[in-house]
Amino acid sequence: MRENHEKLIVGEEDGGARIDVFLAGVMSDRFSRSQIKKWVEDGRIKVQGRHVSAHYRLKPNEEIDFVWEKKADPGAGAEDIPLEILFEDEDLIVVNKPAGMVVHPAAGNWEHTLVNALLFHTKDIQGGKDPVRPGIVHRLDKDTSGVMVVAKNDLAHRYLADQFRDHSIERMYCAVVSGVVQHDEGICEEPVGRAFLSRKKVMVRPSGGKDAVTLFKVRQRYWQATLLDIFPQTGRTHQIRVHLRHLGHPILGDPVYGIPSLWIQRQALHAKILGFRHPVTHEKLSFETEMPSDMRQLVVKLESQSG
């Protein structure tokens, strides 16, 4: 076991955020909020060289310094976790991932992931070269819900990965964003890349960013909010969340790029439709899921406000 040391600089836009909420947002793919809160209480996390409480409000340009013990990678193990399976055959499995579930194990988060659940459900998941994320060809953020496909063998993994790479995958998300979107449809084509001061975050970077294209259509307007159908043409990390923020309509409930909401505790973003060609039969398959209950409740609240 060895210690890992990391530093982050607080951006202007994150001034006023609680330190535990801020860190839980930028490191949601690695650590839980409860882990971070405990490290703050244990004195492992400092701001400007001093100990703070978990509810400390950050100021722009402050330096966060923290240390954690890194254990040897244990690899992915099977866990009896319920799964909503939409389709399965000998080559692939399609699931409806719930919000709050990390896709695959990683440093600081080796349990309770989608891969752990899949390994319990079926013993023959393979594909890809990484033993801790067998079969994974694409990801959803921890707090994004919706449809995912996972390969069961190398042939399926290669075929599906090629479709994601050449952008022939059919994808539609729904999101509830802040503000009333004026145009019925639109596009954002701004390149995105890692933020300069916080490597865990992504930002629009006209120079040095990777190409990213997001289309959207308005499904419903509310008082001070809008329900959008979103069609990402590329699959960059945090692309939808960053593009919507750039357009001035951040996703409600998003602790990193969005705006807080009293009515939902995570980003109101759901991967509703996923379509692709089967790796063996080459048949076009398409799967659609309804918005989960927390997003439906959010929409009901917005409808009541707008009535």
Image: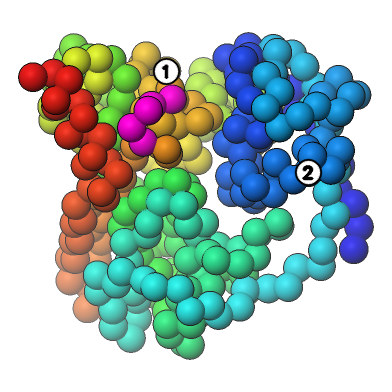
Query: What count of labels does the image hold?
Result: 2
Q: Quadrant of residue 295?
A: top left
Relative to 11, is 272 above or below?
A: below
Q: Main secondary structure of the magenta part?
A: loop
Q: Relative to the observer, which residue lies in front, 261 or 88?
A: 261
Q: Residue at x 53, y 73 (%)?
A: 116
Check disc 2 and report its element: helix, strand or loop.
Answer: helix
Could you say where residue 271 lies in the image, as x and y percent from the top left?
Answer: 30, 48
Q: Which residue is mark 2?
A: 39
Q: Quadrant of residue 175?
A: top left
Classify the position of the N terminus by image quarter: bottom right
Q: Amino acid at mark 1?
A: His
Is residue 49 highlighted in magenta? no
Check disc 1 and report its element: helix, strand or loop.
Answer: helix
Q: Nearer the viewer, mark 1 or mark 2?
A: 2
Could you say where residue 167 lies in the image, as x and y percent from the top left?
Answer: 33, 48
Whether residue 166 appears in this view of the structure is no
Mark 1 or mark 2: name the one nearer the start of the chain: 2
Is residue 261 highlighted in magenta? yes
Q: Relative to the observer, which residue lies in front, 172 or 269?
A: 269
- Does residue 233 appear to the left or right of 165 in the view shown? left
Look at the image and give the residue range highlighted in magenta: 260-264
Whether residue 141 appears in this view of the structure is yes
- Does residue 304 appear to the left or right of 72 in the view shown? left
Q: Quadrant of residue 33?
A: top right
Q: Residue at x 31, y 57 (%)?
A: 147
Classify the position of the C terminus by image quarter: top left
Q: Which residue is mark 1?
A: 246
Could you say where residue 114 lies in the image, as x and y percent from the top left?
Answer: 48, 66
